[in-house]
Structure formats: C-alpha cells, structure tokens
Image (tube, helix red, strand yellow):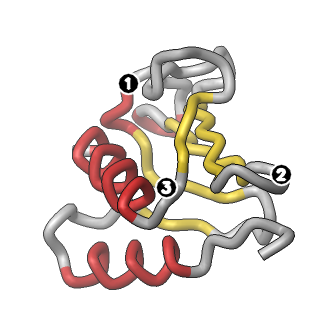
Amino acid sequence: MSMQHLDFLRDKLTNKGWDISNSYSTDLYYVANDCTVYWEISRGYGEPIILYFVIWGDLGNDSFNLNDIVYCRENQTGSSLYFYKINSKEWIENSKKWINNLKIAQE
C-alpha cells in the first residue's frame, strides 16, 4: 500500500513544481541502512527540504519493505503526514494540506 502513497506524493509534489531526488541513490525508492527513504525536494533555490519515510516492520522491527512505511516527516518544521488508506477522505485532505504547507526557507 505504501508504494501507492509514495507514487501519489511524487506526482503531487512534481505537479506543485518540486524537484525530487533520493538523498543516497539515483533510485527514488532506495532504502538506506537505517530503514528510511530520504527524499530531497527543492524548487531550484534555497536549501532543499528533506522528507523522511520511516519504515517499521511487524512489532516495530527493522524493515526494508516499502509497504511498511507508516508516515513521512519533513525536516524544517517536523510536521508529519500519516499514511491512511490511499482513497480515504483523511488521506486526500491531509496530504493536500501537508503538501501545500511545504516551503523553502527563502520563500
């Protein structure tokens, strides 16, 4: 299910003018050794925003399975976006609001 969330966020961020890359790989969905996916998003100026997608397996164990992502946190304000069901009203409303609140420091 989380792959759908990642694809959704990628598409929505790109549509809002954000450039997206993985902090550690050319593969956008690369999972680092600490069981986290790191995206850098930018608009061509200023410091990029880092998005952290933390992966938790069963009972809080480490996991490298993208389907185990529960939420995304951004590094500037620490705000988080939890991964509700992809077509749920909560997900659609919360993701739109969260994406609209992302700002580069110089904006």
Q: Is residue 93 left or right of residue 34?
A: left
User: Which image quarter holds the N terminus?
Assistant: top left
Residue type highlighted by circle 3: Tyr
**Which of these two is toward me, 10 or 29?**
10
Report the number of discs: 3
**Residue 37 percent coordinates (x, y):** 56, 32
| 86 versus 3 height, above or below | below
Q: Quadrant of residue 93?
A: bottom left
| 57 versus 50 height, above or below | above
Pointer 1 residue: 65
Pointer 3 residue: 71
Per the image, label 3 sits on a secondary structure element best described as: strand
Q: Is residue 35 left or right of residue 59?
A: right
**Residue 55 percent coordinates (x, y):** 51, 36
Per the image, label 1 sits on a secondary structure element best described as: loop
Per the image, label 2 sits on a secondary structure element best described as: loop
Name the mark on residue 47.
2
**Residue 78 percent coordinates (x, y):** 74, 66
Residue type highlighted by circle 1: Asn
Structural distance between the alpha carbons of marks 3 and 2: 23 Å
Q: Which numbered disc, 1 or 3, marks the residue that appears first in the sequence?
A: 1
| 67 versus 96 height, above or below | above
Q: Quadrant of residue 102?
A: bottom right
User: Which image quarter holds the C terminus?
Assistant: bottom right
Which residue of the protein is positioned furthest toward the front in this rendering?
Answer: 44
Q: Residue at x 83, y 51 (%)?
A: 47
